[in-house]
C-alpha cells in the first residue's frame, strides 16, 4: 500500500497546513451535476442533485427513509444510470460500471461463506489477475490493518457481525480505492460496535487518504465521522443543507463529548425533522401531524 501511504502523507501535510479547510484550494474528486433518477417512468426517487466531493474529504449523507440516499450512492458508483444529469470521477464520466479506483461496501453481509477471511479479501485481486505474490502481500497487509490476523483462516460463520463487516471493508481496502462508498455499513450492528467501527473507518480514511462517502440514517454517526454532512429532503431527494462539522482529521468517537457536537446534530435534525414527517405522511397516505 505504498501509493496509499504517499496519499496519506500528502493529505496530513495539507491538513496540518490548513489547506484542506479552504474549499477553494481543494481539488474536486467527484461531481454530480443535475442528477435525477426516475424508476419505470413513474417513481421519481432522486434529484436533481448537484454536488462536488472534495478529494480526501469524508462526506456523510443523511435523510428520511426512502429519500434516495442509496440511489445517490448507486448512481455515483456507476451501478445505476442517472435519468438526467452527469457524474464524473477524477474528471472522467461515470457510466455503466464501477470505475477503477472506486470501492463500495454495502450494508448487507456480502461475504462468501465458502471462503476463509483471507480468501474473501483476496477475491477481487484474483479476479483482476493480480500476481500471486502481490495478492498475498496486499491481503496480509489488509488483514493486519483491520485487526483480523488471528482469523485469517476462519470462515464468515465463525465471525461476529462486526468482524464480518471489517472483512468486507478489508476486501474493498485491498483494491486500494481512491473513492470509498459506504452504504449503511453498520446498520445491522449494535450501538457500541457501531461506535468502534466508526473509529476503524476514520483510521482507514486517514491511512489511505481516500475520499469517503457514507450513507447513514444516524445523525450522530454522520456528525461524528464526517467533514461535511449533506442533508437530503423527502423523495425525490435533493440536498437542503450541507453542514461543515469543523472537526480535526485525527478525531474519533470521543468527538461526541465536545459541547459543539450537540449544536451540529441539532442543526441537522431541525432541517431533517420536517422532511421525515413528509416522508412518513407519504408512506402512510395520510397527513403529518402538527409540528411541535
Image: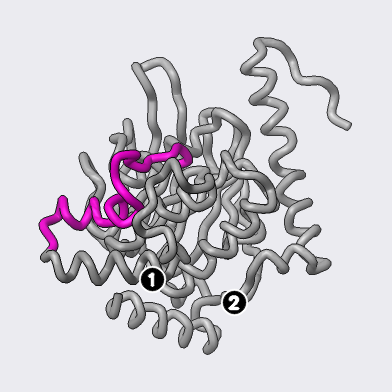
Quadrant hosting residue 229: bottom right
Q: Secondary structure at mark 1?
A: loop
Residue 272: percent from the left, percent from the top? 69, 40
Residue at 40%, 34% in the rendered image:
36
Q: Which residues are magenta?
A: 107-130
- In the picture shown, does residue 31 fall above or below 28? above
Q: Is residue 125 magenta?
A: yes
Residue 143: percent from the left, percent from the top? 38, 65
Point out the image quarter for the C terminus.
Answer: top right
Q: How is the image coloured?
A: one colour
Residue density around tag 1, few if under 14, some if 14–19, many if 20 or more, within 10 Å:
some
Quadrant hosting residue 263: bottom right
Point out the image quarter for the N terminus.
Answer: bottom left
Horizontal relation, residue 150 to residue 217: left or right: left
Q: Which residue is mark 1?
A: 27
Residues at marks 2 and 1, CA–CA distance in whole angstroms: 21 Å
- In the picture shown, does residue 278 fall above or below 268? above
- Give the total number of marks visible in the rendering: 2
Residue at 46%, 27% in the rendered image:
45
Residue 98: percent from the left, percent from the top? 25, 47
Which of the pair 141/79 is nearer the observer? 141
Nearer the viewer's eye, disc 2 or disc 1?
Answer: 2
Quadrant hosting residue 73: top left
Specify which label sits upstream in the sequence, 2 or 1. 1
Q: Secondary structure at mark 2?
A: loop
- In the picture shown, does residue 194 fall above or below 85? below
Residue at 45%, 52% in the rendered image:
51
The image's mark for residue 250 is 2
Q: Is residue 151 magenta?
A: no
Residue at 79%, 66% in the rendered image:
257
Amino acid at each position: 500500500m505504498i501509493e496509499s501511504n504517499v496519499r496519506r502523507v500528502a493529505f496530513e501535510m495539507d491538513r496540518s497546513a490548513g489547506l484542506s479547510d479552504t474549499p477553494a484550494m481543494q481539488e474536486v474528486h467527484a461531481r454530480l451535476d443535475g442528477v435525477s433518477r426516475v424508476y419505470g417512468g413513474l417513481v421519481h426517487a432522486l434529484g436533481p442533485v448537484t454536488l462536488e466531493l472534495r478529494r480526501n474529504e469524508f462526506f456523510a449523507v443523511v435523510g428520511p427513509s426512502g429519500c434516495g440516499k442509496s440511489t445517490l450512492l448507486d448512481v455515483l458508483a456507476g451501478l445505476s444510470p442517472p435519468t438526467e444529469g452527469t457524474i464524473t470521477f477524477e474528471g472522467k464520466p461515470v457510466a455503466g460500471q464501477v470505475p477503477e479506483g472506486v470501492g463500495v461496501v454495502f450494508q448487507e453481509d456480502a461475504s462468501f461463506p465458502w471462503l476463509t477471511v483471507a480468501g474473501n479479501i483476496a477475491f477481487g485481486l484474483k479476479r483482476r489477475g493480480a500476481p500471486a505474490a502481490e495478492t498475498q502481500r496486499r491481503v496480509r497487509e489488509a488483514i493486519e490493518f483491520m485487526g483480523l490476523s488471528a482469523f485469517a483462516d476462519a470462515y464468515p460463520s465463525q465471525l461476529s457481525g462486526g468482524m464480518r463487516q471489517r472483512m468486507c471493508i478489508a476486501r474493498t481496502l485491498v483494491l486500494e480505492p481512491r473513492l470509498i462508498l459506504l452504504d449503511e455499513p453498520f446498520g445491522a450492528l449494535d450501538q457500541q460496535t457501531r461506535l468502534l467501527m466508526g473509529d476503524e473507518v476514520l483510521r482507514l480514511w486517514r491511512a489511505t487518504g481516500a475520499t469517503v462517502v457514507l450513507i447513514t440514517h444516524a445523525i450522530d454517526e454522520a456528525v461524528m465521522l464526517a467533514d461535511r454532512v449533506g442533508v437530503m429532503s423527502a423523495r425525490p431527494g435533493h440536498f437542503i443543507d450541507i453542514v461543515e462539522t469543523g472537526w480535526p482529521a485525527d478525531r474519533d468517537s470521543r468527538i461526541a463529548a465536545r459541547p459543539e457536537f450537540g449544536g451540529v446534530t441539532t442543526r441537522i435534525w431541525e432541517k431533517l425533522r420536517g422532511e421525515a414527517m413528509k416522508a412518513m405522511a407519504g408512506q402512510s397516505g395520510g397527513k403529518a401531524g402538527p409540528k411541535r
